[in-house]
Amino acid sequence: MQGRFEAIGRVRAARQEATDDYWGDSESIITLGDRFSAEALEGLGDFSHVEILYLFHEVDPERIVSGARHPRNNHEWPRVGIFAQRGKNRPNRIGSTICRIVRLEGQSVIVAGLDAIDGTPVLDIKPVMVEFLPRSAVRQPQWSHELMQDYWKSDS
């Protein structure tokens, strides 16, 4: 069954374009759309983190990858399928990031560490609960550690 998704809100952020690294200083405001009141965020402030699901809205549909590629077009890293990487050129263009809640203000959630650009449509906000995090050790290949080396660093 396929459904139609509507954004629940939008991101306001200083970053205007998606770049590969240096998201460490990012603080963003997610403001809910008019169909939601501040009541929709009630109780969220009791959590330290949220998972934000959002749309890579500026990805050109012609650039969507459905097979394999070298992450970031770096041929030193193995060619892997789009579902074995977190690139933005994915079939449904859905991004997901766990962020720290800084504070709530009315219909807005201010978060730290969201790798989304200004104007990004937000599809969902979920509180992070330990019970939904991995219940065993996380394993990942070496190239992915190299790829992420500067991702969360400060740009200054």
Image: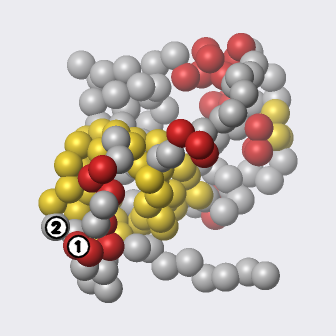
Residue 14 in sight here: no
Residue at position x 32%, y 73% from top?
40
Q: Which residue is mark 2?
A: 106
SS for dot 2: loop
Q: Residue 53's x, y, as percent?
A: 51, 57
Residue at position x 84%, y 47% from top?
67
Of all residues, the one furthest to the left in this rendering is: 105
Q: Is residue 62 left or right of residue 28?
A: right
Residue sitting nearer the eye, 111 or 40 = 40
133 vs 10: above or below: above
Of all residues, the one furthest to the bottom in this rendering is: 35
Residue at position x 44%, y 74% from top?
7
Q: Quadrant of residue 1?
A: bottom right
Residue 50 in sight here: yes
Residue sitting nearer the eye, 93 or 107 = 107
Q: Residue 147's x, y, as percent?
A: 60, 22
Q: Are marks 2 and 1 in contact (CB under 8 Å)?
A: yes
Which label's residue is closer to the chain start, 2 or 1? 1
Q: Amino acid at mark 2?
A: Gly
47 vs 119: above or below: above
Q: Is residue 4 left or right of residue 105?
A: right
Q: Which residue is mark 1?
A: 38
Q: Is residue 36 left or right of residue 79?
A: left
Q: Residue 137's x, y, as percent?
A: 71, 22
Q: Amino acid at mark 1?
A: Ala
